[in-house]
Amino acid sequence: MKRAAVTRRLIGLLLLAGGHPSAGFAQDALQPYQLVRSLQLIQDRIAAGDHAALPMQAKLLEMADARLRAANAEDYKDPKNFRALLVYGMSGGNPVTVEAATSRATTDPQSLAIAKGVIDYLNGRPGEAIEALRPIDPMALPPDLGAFLALVKGSLLAGDQPATALRLLDEARLLSPGTLVEEAALRRSVGLAVAQGDAARFALASTQYVERYLYSPYASQFADSFVSGVIALHMSISQDKLGDITSMMDPEREKVIYLRIARRAAVDGLNDLSAFASARAEQGRDGNTNQDDPRALLYASLSTVTSGTIEDVRAKLGKIDRSRLSEGDRALLDAAQAIAGEVVAPPTALPAEKPAPVPAAAAQPVPEIATAQGADDSGLPPVEGAISEQPAVTAASSGPAANAPDTAAAASPDPATVMPASAPSPAAGPEPADPTDAAMTRTRRQLDLIDQMLGAAPK
């Protein structure tokens, strides 16, 4: 109750300052630590989803900046005011203000070391910031300062020492629950858990974020990390666990999350995950399905484009409204329709084997013109733009080199050069003209081709 009353009083002063001709008496009437505390209260409301407080945050940052610039050495003898200066800096404040105020302040060496680290951090010097802040334990500081310091140190160490960074982010949350500091710490923890391959930590941090901060204006950054984490950790996160996390979202956010997962999974070739996410996106909630959403239809079709229900898939693809898709999704639709058409196309007759020409003189060796010119003996048309690597293989080849797997052909992006293990070598003659074998070979090539086309699509 007391906190709410203080907030109302400070907001009243803020509004009064905004309409007063001098626009400066309100911040002069308050100590620097009072203005910074007001800023923190507004930021906590924003983290909880109060987007209407965003303009108030901008105004409070302006007022706090002016008051901290105007404060003299006597003001900064009060430890609360100097801590407020540091918190202001770590809340997105102006580094010039922090540096100028620090230069005229008289305080203890540890506070000055923190100030140096904060100034380096704000000016984009992470190495210097880490060195200045490394020996300082956030848990030994007053909670308002320690929470911000733990968040900053955790962010600085995330790249090189992720395990230490996660511990610091936990400390930040412990020191400042229910605040913007906790929101930011949880958001960063999700990404770090993915980098560590820690599926349990990822699921826990995601659950806590959705429970507490789903409506934060920074939740879109969480969504990016969450979708990337589901893709990266798909082997370690069950569909039931994923469903538990998304069930705490409102229906629209849940649909968007599943659509994004379905698309990423389809592009990455994770057909089971794509099919699951597409189905959940179509399913909707409370009897409101999303079956008319072209994205859900497209992503669901991508996971079944080479299945036995290809005619149904083609019909689905044909009903998708292209005008409602992004440019990247239209490219995916084109790829899916092209592959679906190739799967059902009748097999073409393979060319008959030509009789070998009779040499004019048996005593003269016949030059290997086909091998020298790089001709394709497979009887398959080359894919436009692909690089075909045809090794020189003759019937006389023998030894380990002849029996070793053709790693160059297996790694080639051209599906026309990838031959099944049971297929004869080019020197052994053309492929059998059996229609069933030819159809199986075509389907195998189409699977390779769709992987290439989806992999080239924008993610």
Image: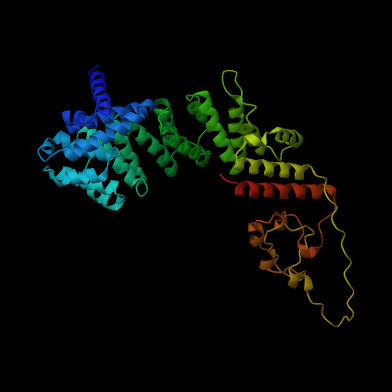
Coloring scheme used: rainbow
Q: Residue at the front extreme?
A: 21
Q: Residue 124 appears at what percent x and percent y? A: 31, 50
Q: Nearer the viewer, residue 409 or 68?
A: 68
Residue 364, visible in the rendered structure: yes
Q: Residue 198 appears at what percent x and percent y? A: 43, 39
Q: Residue 269 appears at what percent x and percent y? A: 61, 43
Residue 269, visible in the rendered structure: no
Task: Give the left or right position of residue 16, taking residue 290 as reference.
Answer: left
Residue shown at the point (62%, 32%) measured from the top left: 296
Kindly indicate the quadrant of the structure image that contains residue 286. top right
Task: Give the left or right position of residue 355, taking residue 213 as reference.
Answer: right
Q: Nearer the viewer, residue 235 or 92?
A: 92
Kindly indicate the quadrant of the structure image that contains residue 181. top left
Q: Nearer the viewer, residue 414 or 106?
A: 106
Residue shown at the point (25%, 24%) measured from the top left: 16
Residue shown at the point (23%, 21%) measured from the top left: 9
Q: Quick one: quadrant of the C terminus?
A: top right
Question: Can you say whether 357 is above or below 194 in the image?
Answer: below
Q: Quick one: quadrant of the N terminus?
A: top left
